[in-house]
Amino acid sequence: MANLLEVTDDTFDEKVLKSSIPVVVDFWAEWCPPCKMIAPFLVEIAAEYEGKVLICKVNVDDNHNLAQKYGIRSIPTLLYIKQGKIEDQVVGALPKEQLAEHLIKLL
């Protein structure tokens, strides 16, 4: 999948915080229906903004440290990160257009 990356507790700092381009981090879980609803939107956004933004996925069941560090209490939660800093956050399933609107603010 274009520009879509699974990150873990071990790879988050290197892949996300040190990224030279803005990053959208999707905190999700396999059992979460709203997470599954937005997954195709994120794939489409990753393809449309390839080279301009990186879309990353963090499975909260496998990466408890990251979920705890960023205070993830509900999923899906998307963090919009630029130059290692959280610039925006979305909690819950939103339409593709609204997810992209938050991303455009980073570019």
Image (cartoon, rainbow, N blue to C red):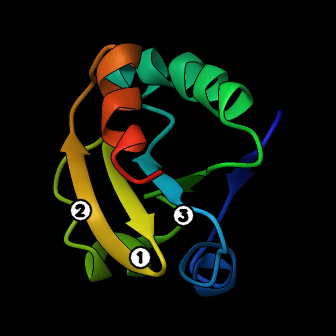
Residue ID for mark 2: 72
Q: Amino acid at mark 1?
A: Leu
Q: Is residue 81 left or right of residue 93?
A: right
Answer whether labels 2 and 1 touch (C-beta < 8 Å): yes
Residue ID for mark 1: 66
Q: Residues within 10 Å of mark 1 (few under 14, many from 20)?
A: some
Instruction: Report the Cα–Cα distance between label 2 and label 1.
Output: 8 Å
Residue ID for mark 3: 62
Q: Is residue 106 left or right of residue 50?
A: left
Q: Does 60 sit above or below residue 42?
A: below
Looking at the rendered structure, the secondary structure element under dot 1 is helix
Answer whether labels 3 and 1 touch (C-beta < 8 Å): no
Horizontal and vertical percent for residue 105?
33, 46
Q: Amino acid at mark 2?
A: Ile
Horizontal and vertical percent for residue 86?
31, 70
Residue at coordinates 50% horizontally, 70% vertically from top-left?
63
Q: Nearer the viewer, mark 2 or mark 3?
A: 2
